[in-house]
Image (spheres, rainbow, N blue to C red):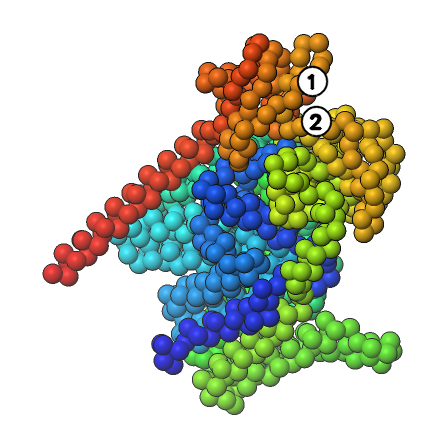
Amino acid sequence: MKKSWKYLILLVIPLAFLVYLRGDFAFPVRGDYSDLVISHLPNAEFLRRNLLDGELPLWSPLLFGGYPFAANPLSGLHYPPGWLALLFPLPLGFNLVTALHMILAGLGMYLFLRQNGLSDWPALTAGVVFQAMPKLMAHFAAGHLTLTYAVCLTPWVLWAEFKRIEHRGSMIWTIAPGIALALLALADIRWAPYAAILWLFYSLREFFRQRSSPKARKFIVWLGGAILQGLVVGVLTAPLWLPLLELVPLTTRAEMTAGERVGISLPAANLLGVFVPSMGSYAEWELYAGALPWLVLIFTLAVPDLRRRVWFWLAVLALSLAASLGEVVPGYAFISGLPGFSLLRVPARALFLCGFSFAVLTGYALEYLSQTKVEQKPEPVFFMVPFVAFPLLIAAGMGLYLGGYYEPFLWAGVALLFGFLAILAAEKRWLRVEISQCVFLLLIIIEMGGMDASIMTRKKPADVYGPFADLLQVVAPKSGDLYRVYSPSFSLPQYIAVQQNLDLVDGIDPMQLRSYVKLFSAASGIPIHSYSVTLPPFTGGDPQKDNAAYSPNAKLLGVLNTKYVLSAFPLSTAGLKWVQVVNGIQVYENSDYRERAWVESDSGGVRSVEILDYTANRVSLQAQGPGTLVLSDVVYPGWQARVDGQSTDIQPYQGALRSVRLNGGLHQIEFVFHPISVYLGWGLALTGWIMIGVLSLKQRRMNAGSRE
């Protein structure tokens, strides 16, 4: 196989992905919501707008009275490759960068397995299995954009570990796994603990595999190397984790109970999905890795020599599958409470490691089939027969007795049958090895392409943005206006609001400041008793009805700079004046509305404030004292205030907002966001990258000297 052509195989699925989506949004085939649209799109639009204005935003006023953008793992601020999407219209940019990461996923898996001794075809097939993993596409369709990026980088962490072992003594390769893991963490820190555990045990396995009788001193050296990788990761990801470390204790997420941490576990009943596809069910529970990977797993378990060779990956598969069950696994609740894991609330995401293992096992099994003629009794294919027959019989039974068939069983049965015949032909040498490998690869591409297409649907940007055009005619701010909108029914999504430079009282984000949530609960009238990524929470899962029984407090909403209230149901609240109905949405104007900033006199009167400048990181005001100047933005570490150029303390107002005391006279007031945690993180990361650059140059000179 010519080297110049082999990599093109890894482009087939990503190119098909791009041709299918082009400039459209991906949505789950059985869902109306996508986190890409809800969270990533407004963050990307906000970031792009501020970059074009010449400012790197560390703070965002979009939701919840403002929040630390630099500390938000979903901001996309800390992963520059993700910024490539901003060069194109969205969502085309998202689709292009995702396709690029899919290529990296396949290439990384290919290179990793080639380094482990596999030949081209098996390694390429494994690469396609991983890059086209249905779970990966299900999560992308659900809008888990940065998680998709991070998972795609996983093979490169293990590839870097292999290179570290191969190039002992090389300064730059010594820290390569740490660099790869850091980039993965910057893409999405939620995947980093899983990837780190996989790398750690893989490294430990390699340590023992290469030493028949490892001594304590050698183990201490290995342990020191592992700690070094941790330090590299810590330094390079400091711009993310230092601000996050400051933010988390102040949020409701830090108070998650054990039940909430394991709330999205894989139901045991869904284990059937390991060889019968769900055809677009809940992304977190997607388990199917393909018919051929399942059959080669059976083949691997049936062949003792192969089983011994890949025991590590069998263990990873089994343990990740067990971990995904979460709440039913003894001790999992305790593990989820450990530092670093206490914020991971979706045990089912361990299934990505399961899919990774399926890809690796597929490569090794196909390599074995190409190199070894199987002559054992009973033959490995014997154990596959029940799994091929079961879905076919179920599909036939449904067709005969119910007048139809259940599509997943028919799909599984047909795919398993073709996979079974391909393995049988390879095992019996009915086909030349090269042809068998081509057949395996073709089966994977066809099935994975079909599965991925069945998981997602697409929506035109006009269909996503269009339904809100009439509503925006009523509530969109005119030039210079600065106010917020509140909806108890999620009637104005944040991706629409950001287009109009309109800030929201409510919203969806996993990081919510406790102080704000308390004030919000009082203002909205909605009790909040447990963690929720939505504010307000929708306890019944239906935003159109769930909060209809609660009445907001117009005065407190006014304190939050709320001019309009939008609701899918009627509200009878003093202070809210009904305006009109727009496409089924009730529009109310708040009679108790206050501007973004005001001065409260000691006698209780309120005076207006002139807003001179209002950007992400800086607010400049002019106000007449005496009294208390209130800025209806949340108070948070890093915000500094100056009155007439003199620093002054910021005092919490209503427990959550910013205020400063003014003496008599006209004053210039400035609020500036200078987060020490962010600056310290930047300093550490910059130092780390400079040191890596110096080491690279030094290594290059040493290599050049040795060649001479």
Where is residue 559, by image quadrant? top right
Q: Are marks 1 and 2 in contact (CB under 8 Å)?
A: yes
| Residue under numbered circle 2 | 594
| Residue under numbered circle 1 | 606
Do we see residue 594 in this rendering? yes
The amino acid at mark 2 is Arg
**Spot occupied by residue 187 in the image (x, y as percentages of width and height):** 49, 50
The quadrant of the image that shows the N terminus is: bottom left
What's the CA distance linking mark 1 and mark 2? 9 Å
Give the residue drawn at x 53%, y 35%: 615
**Residue lying at the far bottom of the rendered structure:** 430
Give the residue drawn at x 55%, y 22%: 622
State the residue in front, 568 or 17: 568
Q: Which mark is residue 3?
A: none
The amino acid at mark 1 is Val
Do we see residue 273 in this rendering? no
Give the residue drawn at x 54%, y 58%: 89
Where is residue 626, by image quadrant? top right
Report helix, strand or loop for mark 2: loop
Give the residue drawn at x 57%, y 67%: 22
Vertically, is 274 above or below 411? above
State the residue in front, 434 or 587: 587
Report helix, strand or loop for mark 1: strand
Vertically, is 91 above or below 573? below
**Spot occupied by residue 484 in the image (x, y as percentages of width and height):** 68, 36
**Spot occupied by residue 72 in the image (x, y as percentages of width and height):** 55, 40
**Spot occupied by residue 604 in the image (x, y as percentages of width and height):** 72, 13
Which of the marked residues, 1 or 2, is nearer the chain's N terminus? 2
